Amino acid sequence: MSLEHVVLGFLVAAPAHGYGLCARINDQLGELHPVHASHVYAALAKLERRGLVTAHVAHERRRARRVFFVTTGGVRAHDAWRDERGPSPLRRPLLAKAALLALLGERHGARQLRAERAARECLLGELRSLPPAAAIACLLRDRARRHLEVELWLLDQIAREAG
């Protein structure tokens, strides 16, 4: 998922100006994916060039702001992205790498499996130490934690098999 998808999704929910959009994204997802206003504006520019959003100038408190709206093409693009199926789980890099290392059965393979496991344990520890957050961020955090736990289990199984 790219920042463009996130921006488009938030605009499908409600039109917004750039800084307001950045604040909404950071309120909901900032803990896991903090964004800087310059990145949001770059994504908005790309979406506007592709005709997926359009901007209108609105005057708020003696200040002109560009408020972004999703076009019909933007809604279709968002719906297509939302409904698309991701790649097969068998194509995930960790699975391919772990299977290859297990097949090779080399010392390097075992060392690499331990390094992969240590990296995931570190990420899991970071996730568990995060403070409470918005509901959607908690769901994303829980999803990430579960994925890491499954990957750790997988690495343990492969290490046992390679044994």
Image (spheres, grey):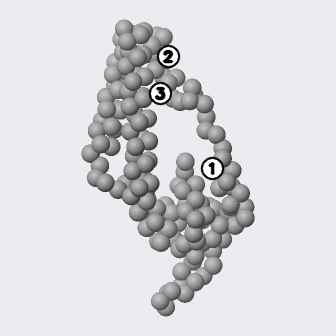
Taking the spot 58% from the left edge, 54% from the top edge, the residue there is: 5
Residue marked by disc 2: 100
Q: Give the foreground label among 3 and 1.
A: 1
Q: Is residue 39 visible to the viewer in this orientation of the structure?
A: yes
- Marked residue nearer the N-terminal end (2 or 1): 1
Kind of element beneath mark 2: helix
Return the residue nearer the eye: 52 or 88. 88
Residue 82: image tag: 1
In percent of width and height, residue 133 lies at: 35, 56
Image quadrant where one finds the C terminus: top left
Q: Is residue 34 visible to the viewer in this orientation of the structure?
A: no
Seen in the picture, residue 23 relative to 136 is either above or below; the reply is: below
Return the residue nearer the eye: 87 or 115. 87
Identify the amino acid type marked 1. Answer: Arg
Mark 2 to mark 1 CA distance (whole Å): 32 Å
Q: Which image quadrant is residue 107 in?
A: top left
Residue marked by disc 3: 94
- Marked residue nearer the N-terminal end (3 or 1): 1
Return the residue nearer the eye: 103 or 83. 83
Badge 2: residue crowd in 10 Å (few <14, some 14–19, many ≥20): few
In percent of width and height, residue 106 lies at: 40, 10
Kind of element beneath mark 3: helix
Taking the spot 69% from the left edge, 50% from the top edge, the residue there is: 80
- Marked residue nearer the N-terminal end (2 or 3): 3
Kind of element beneath mark 1: helix
Seen in the picture, residue 155 relative to 26 is either above or below; the reply is: above
Taking the spot 42% from the left edge, 28% from the top edge, the residue there is: 151
